[in-house]
Image (cartoon, grey):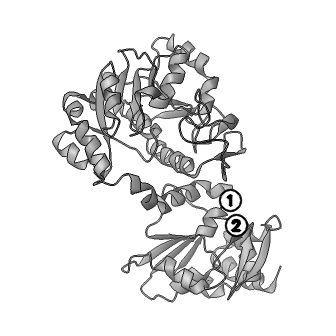
Amino acid sequence: MSELFEQNIAIINKRWPQIAKHLKQTSFEHLDAQLVTGLTQTIRVNGVQLSSRHDRIAEAKLFIETLPQSASKVSLYGIGMGDTVSLLVDNPTLQEINIYLLNMAMFALLLTYTDQQEWLDDARVKLMASTDPFAIGSPYIASTPDLQLADNINAATRDILAQENHREFTNRHHQDHDPAIEQRLADNLNFLNQDQDAATLTDLYQNRDVFVIGAGPTLEQFYGYILNKLSSSPPPLIIAVDTAFKALAYNGITPDIVISIDAKITPAHLPSAVSDTVKLVYFPRVMTSLLKAWPGERFAAYSQTSMYQKLNEKNPRLQLFCNGSVIHPAVDLAIKMQPSSIALFGCDFCYANNKTHAFWNDGDLGPKVSVSKKHLIENGQGEQVTTDLNFRGYLRSLEKLIYQHPEIDFYQSSPQSAKLLGVPLLSL
């Protein structure tokens, strides 16, 4: 142990003895760490710089400028080289500074080679060894290098914060006054006026066990299982996303409800012959041609975004949770039916079996396995598997939705799917 580590750990041991004990037992030998010099110095860990190597203080000030000027408390997720928190303790208006460590080994490394005593000894600072991904403190600063280097224990927190960091960029395609969106909503207004409220379905299908079916590649493992369960009495209610419908129809499975929310889904994404018994739940941004082609009953719903606020004032409809994936409103609709259980099929959020979707060819629905994937996620077998950054965000949003409904038993069908926190595997 270095002299700096001993000095830093002495303060931590006095204030947070459990964290000190953990740090003393933590090795950072597996980290590829190097000193990097520019106009100033920083540390590079596994190819990621913990801060700027040219002007660390200016970078830290940029992080701090994102906080409201009236803030009396702040949460830090990761600390980089410690510069941000060093500046924060100089602010007398701050009464509480909560620091969440996203990688304990990296923190042990930092304590070994840098002096962090000033802020460690500040009474307003609270050091946290773990995070609750469903209770992100606000306002907060998330250190980008720490997010990239977060360990598996903090993967959920990492993904939620990364999604929040990208929200403004993501929402550029969902602006309230986008002319294309306004035109689509106008084109679909006649359908909205005549179609039923999706809320009526929550009364129609009360207290049924529900299968929510996504289009992920593991769906291909369960066609036989689903068919067998449909012959039971009573059968489960089948709620499928639009891109899973063709796969189900090809294998002789007719869902009760299909959900479509995406502006780019066309009739070609659906089976050539759709039974008029299948009910469509849609958001008004879907293609008008899709609504025209649907042979059965249609039920309108909205997401809880401002985009549908004016429509909901004039045409109230069921509001369903959605944070980027059609699986979200499918699950939320199932929740509103008050079932005893919800089983998830093809809700993978990763490229299981090196595929993007069940039934569809690589690239048919946008994502391609052939394109280099830089992001990983843990599946139900404890393996790190390839995924996309947005998939990780969708997964965490679903986890939060499930977390809010402990009265319902949720199950994952495949251990090859990305692991959902607190959701056991279905007993087959």
Q: Give the residue type at disc 2.
A: Met
Quadrant placement of the C terminus? top right
Q: x%, y% of residue 30?
A: 81, 64
The correct choice, above or below, for 55 with respect to 245 in the image is below
Quadrant placement of the N terminus? bottom right
Mark 2 sits on what residue? 104
Q: Earlier in the sequence, mark 2 or mark 1?
A: 2
Quadrant in which residue 242 is drawn: top left
Evaluate if marks 2 and 1 touch, with contact meaning CB atoms under 8 Å apart.
Answer: yes
Q: Secondary structure at mark 2?
A: helix
Give whichever of 315, 207 is nearer the camera: 315
Q: Is residue 96 visible?
A: yes
The correct choice, above or below, for 16 with respect to 56 in the image is above
Between circles 2 and 1, the one closer to the viewer is: 1
In-image side of 163 versus 191 (left or right): right
Tell me which residue sits at (36%, 15%) in the image.
Answer: 277
Tell me which residue sits at (55%, 46%) in the image.
Answer: 391
Quadrant in which residue 111 is drawn: bottom right
Q: x%, y% of residue 42?
A: 70, 81
Give whichever of 415, 58 is nearer the camera: 58
Tell me which residue sits at (40%, 31%) in the image.
Answer: 259
The correct choice, above or below, for 390 with respect to 225 in the image is below
Point out which mark residue 379 bears: none
Q: CA distance from mark 2 to mark 1?
A: 8 Å
Mark 2 surroundings: few (<14), some (14-19) or many (≥20) residues within 10 A: many
Q: x%, y% of residue 249?
A: 50, 18
In-image side of 47 versus 299 (left or right): right
Mark 1 surroundings: few (<14), some (14-19) or many (≥20) residues within 10 A: some
Mark 1 sits on what residue? 151
Q: Give the residue type at disc 1.
A: Asp
Q: In the rendered picture of this protein, how many numbered marks are placed on residues?
A: 2
Quadrant in which residue 411 is drawn: top right
